Image (spheres, rainbow, N blue to C red):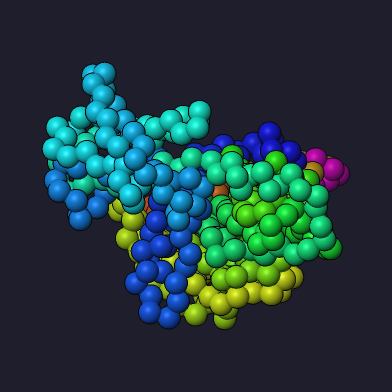
């Protein structure tokens, strides 16, 4: 499957990229509050242009930070523009920390920030000016000097999965949406071709594996197989891949191995109902409120290349298959009964009359059983009556089928 394919999973994945960015912010808050370990900050390009409400700015203020490539490369003394929906534009130059701050903005006015750096136009999302507190956001220009290093000849070397790698799981209606946000790091100053190709398979049972927007052109998929071809340029290569796993029970394992060392295991799970996450490889986790939902944020230690990561999700929402099998079984009984009736030889007229009566009785009992099952599965009626009546119907059907199958004694059937 190419990056242009993927059907339903691809459409769902693209629609959730914004939520994924929000989940990353939640996990960063979780990591920052943890005393035993810290996550690295995400790739600035992934967070560029996204407004973030804060309470450390004056009410009605917007602070725009302008950087080149990395957080350490501030762009000072450079104009940043704030555009209003009515066409008004404010311009402020960045300070030594690369920040331009706009104060006393009319609350609720639609605004967006922009800047032009070395011929590259940078622009944020549009958002309403805050009535209380402030907004911080970043604009990230391309580091052309770092990009020039990628033109050097490739050498054999290693890549790793950096600290920004995330596994995101979203339980849904009888499926789990699985997202891998892979941060492949080449720490060398020249392009690197790994001795072992960067290839892996999605979890067993994966459906609709696809690459999401923002993934490197080095990546491709074929069925549930993912390949990232080298050489890898210096720095980070982003690969975002998604699939769906069918849910047939209230608990399931998601097992995944990656072909490179993982610096730190980081997992996000959208909590639906009482969904729980467990794994021997996780050292800590907590529930994080997020826009009316709860996200389970969990962290673990480093994971060696090709070592399976096993994540167990329990209390998953799913529908029992019992009603489906019951309906299929009843349909099969009706079909077999019809075939049997159509092929049974004729006896005397008295037997034929009794046989027709038995067949009519059988059809009535089967129809009542189907209706009883349907009412119960739809929540109508109480369980005690359902259990008692169902047993009576099965007993009556056994007598009817027995009588129809016995040519010597078709009468005396219990009704």
Relative horizontal placement of residue 346, taking residue 400 as reference (left or right): right
Query: x%, y% of residue 145?
Result: 60, 45
Quarter of image, res 87 = top left
Horizontally, residue 46 falls left or right of residue 203, namely left
In this orientation, which residue lies closer to the viewer: 233 or 373? 233
Give percent across and percent down for residue 203.
69, 60
Observer-nearest of 407 and 292 = 292
Residue at 61% across, 48% down = 146
Specify whether residue 342 is painted magenta. yes
Q: How many marks?
A: 0
| Left or right: 49 in relation to 6 | left
Vertical position of residue 273 compared to residue 375: above or below: below
> What span is colored magenta in the figure?
340-345
Quadrant the N terminus occupies: top right
Residue at 63%, 55% in the rendered image: 235
Q: Is residue 387 visible?
A: no
- Residue drawn at the location 67% of the way across and 54% of the way down: 234
The residue that appears at 83% across and 45% down in the rendered structure is: 344
| In this picture, residue 125 sits left or right of residue 101 | right
Position in image of residue 406 (x %, y %): 78, 59
The main secondary structure of the magenta stretch is helix
């Amino acid at each position: 499957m190419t990056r242009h394919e993927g059907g339903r999973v691809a459409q769902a994945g693209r629609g959730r990229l914004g939520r994924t960015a929000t989940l990353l912010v939640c996990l960063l808050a979780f990591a920052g509050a943890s005393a035993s370990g810290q996550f690295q900050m995400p790739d600035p390009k992934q967070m560029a242009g996204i407004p973030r409400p804060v309470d450390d700015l004056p009410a009605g203020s917007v602070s725009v930070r302008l950087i080149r490539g990395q957080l350490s490369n501030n762009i000072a003394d450079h104009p940043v523009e704030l555009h209003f929906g009515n066409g008004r534009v404010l311009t402020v130059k960045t300070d030594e920390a690369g920040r331009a701050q706009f104060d006393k903005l009319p609350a609720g006015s639609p605004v967006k920030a922009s800047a032009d750096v070395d011929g590259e136009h940078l622009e944020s999302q549009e958002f309403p000016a805050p009535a209380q507190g402030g907004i911080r956001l970043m604009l990230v220009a391309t580091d052309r000097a770092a990009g020039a290093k990628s033109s050097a000849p490739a050498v054999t070397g290693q890549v790793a999965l950096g600290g920004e790698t995330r596994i995101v799981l979203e339980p849904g209606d009888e499926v789990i949406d699985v997202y891998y946000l892979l941060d492949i790091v080449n720490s060398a100053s020249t392009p690197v071709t790994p001795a072992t190709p960067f290839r892996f398979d999605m979890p067993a049972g994966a459906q609709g594996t696809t690459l999401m927007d923002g993934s490197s052109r080095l990546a491709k998929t074929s069925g549930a197989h993912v390949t990232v071809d080298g050489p890898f340029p210096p720095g980070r290569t982003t690969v975002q891949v998604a699939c769906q796993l069918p849910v047939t029970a209230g608990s399931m394992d998601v097992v995944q191995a990656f072909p490179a060392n993982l610096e730190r295991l980081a997992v996000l799970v959208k909590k639906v109902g009482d969904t729980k996450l467990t794994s021997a490889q996780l050292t800590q986790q907590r529930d994080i409120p997020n826009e009316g939902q709860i996200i389970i944020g969990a962290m673990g230690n480093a994971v060696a290349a090709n070592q399976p990561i096993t994540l167990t999700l329990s209390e998953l929402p799913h529908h029992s298959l019992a009603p489906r099998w019951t309906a299929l079984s009843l349909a099969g009984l009706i079909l077999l009964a019809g075939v049997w009736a159509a092929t049974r030889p004729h006896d005397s007229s008295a037997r034929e009359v009794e046989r027709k009566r038995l067949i009519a009785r059988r059809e009535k009992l089967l129809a009542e059983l189907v209706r009883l099952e349907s009412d119960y599965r739809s929540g109508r009626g109480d369980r005690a009556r359902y259990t008692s009546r169902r047993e009576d119907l099965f007993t009556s059907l056994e007598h009817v089928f027995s009588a129809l199958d016995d040519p010597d004694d078709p009468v005396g059937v219990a009704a």
